[in-house]
Amino acid sequence: MVVDVLCRWLVGLGADEVCTVPGEAFLPLLARARAHGLHTVTTRHEGGAGFMAVASARLTGKPGVVAVNRSPGSTNVSIAVDAAAADPTPLVVLVGDIPTGADRRTAFQGADLAGMFGALATTFTLTVDGLGEQLAKAAEVLAGPVPQPVVLLVPEDLWTAGSEVEVPPPPPALAEPDLGELLPVLTDAARPVLLAGRLLRSRHTDGTANDLLSVLAQKAGLPVLVGNKQQDLLDNLHPNYAGHLHLGTPRQVRERLAQADVVVLLGEFADEIHMSGWTGPRVHVVDRQAPRDVLEALAAADWPAPAPERSAWVRGWHELAEDLAAPHPKPFEDGIDFTHVAAALDADLPADAVITFDAGNFSSWIHRYVHAGPKRLMLALGNGAMGFGVPAAVAAAHRYPQRTVVAVVGDGGLLMTGDELATGRAQGRCPVVVVADNGGYGTIDQHARRQFPGTYCGTSLHTPNLVTWAEAFGMPGETVRSPHEVPGAVRRALAAGPGGYLLHVRTSLRAGHANKE
């Protein structure tokens, strides 16, 4: 049957689970998944299921898998498809579609899913005759140098259709890297900068990107900046670590970057976040080869000893990064400076902790003051989608039951997908959840105050009693209202064990952003 071909194909890609909200249009998949070694993760919302699958892909290096019903289930999962496309992630979305030949205008939940998903991802409507070719093309997209999500629309009657199709072989390996242009650029530059990015994670999560970057940086004498939300690519205490670029990159970093004579983007994109303010004469973008293979080749190459001037250039970068990471909390009348929480987490988090983020200005304090790497992982989305933090943490707690997992979320994002704590409870392990509650959509409030001073733009929120809310999931918690309560509360949260803990922090809305001057 087609369902067995699809299951074998998923297992061949390295998948071991399917995240889902069960639906009648793909019941054969749920009935056969276990027989093929695919664990079913039953979630509370398709958006949460999709975010869990994205997090799973980030943690394993293998495609994440999510299965949903046709509209409206498919529209719910589209947020994860958008996130996987923006932050290149191999994600397989299986959609139980209307039966073959049915009229979409009259069929129940018959929306034009090919048109909708086709704007976000490579999309196939599967057929018996074309199944082998369609799956082979999908595998190429998932395993490419820039991995992307794939949506497979499976007509409801196709799952149980007979099929003699053999599972297509894996796509061929990418071409060997050519360093001919790159080596002279990096060797001859007086003030180079290596910008390491998300594509260095493709198909790998074994930590060797960190090791390879360390070797390359030291041998070649390179300061290493990391891309947006990629802070854990290099040990932040490494002498060649230069900081990271993001929407709120400090002015000092931009000014120093302007002094570089070449920027090499390795596994990252030359988008407005990374290139804003860059005035150097040359940018060399590595985008035609597998970035991870290029990194391995660069680390293995012979490099001349760095000149004293270049070594001083590297030292200046790291000194700036460490200076910016030194916490200096400020007093605010409307709540706690989140610097206190970030400093406490940095001091008490285990070296192998996993931190997941939701979108919002609150994350800027964690990125600035919490050191990452080489095993302290950080999972976040670069496209600003809210709702990722809790589902990602639930996925990480399931993948790494012996490690401390902390979700750092805002009061807005928490109540978008926080119900996935029920999924964590069902799996026997919940994360620690740190909630930065400033009483509103803080990032948008900051923009509104700047663009329309004195005008209310709907950014305030009324948040329920979050400790009581957490207790409904069987999770203890507490509220912190003053800075002196923070260290003890963080220690209690991190010591909570597999039942999880919710730390509700009343933060300052006026503080705005960790890098606000």
Image: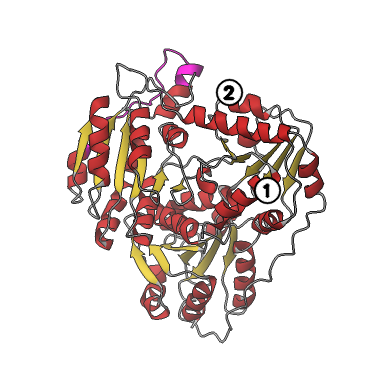
Residue of label 2: 251
User: Which residue shows up at 74% across the image and 63% down it?
Assistant: 176
Secondary structure of the magenta portion, mostly? loop
User: Which residue shows up at 55% across the image and 51% down it?
Assistant: 210
Give the CA distance from mark 2 to mark 1: 29 Å
Residue of label 1: 219
255 relative to 235, above or below: above
> Which amino acid does the dot numbered 1 rest on?
Lys
Measured as percent of width and height from the top left, residue 28 is found at 40, 76
Residue 443 in the figure: left or right of residue 291: left
Measured as percent of width and height from the top left, residue 267 is found at 64, 49
Tell which tag, 2 or 1, sits nearer the viewer.
1
Q: What stretch is highlighted in magenta?
A: 448-466
Q: Can residue 119 be seen in this view?
A: no
User: Which residue shows up at 68% across the image and 48% down it?
Assistant: 219
Q: Work out which residue is located at the far top of the displayed protein and give it.
A: 454
Residue 107 lies in the magenta stretch: no
Label 2: state its secondary structure: helix
Label 1: state its secondary structure: helix
- Between residue 93 and residue 465, name the one nearer to us: 465
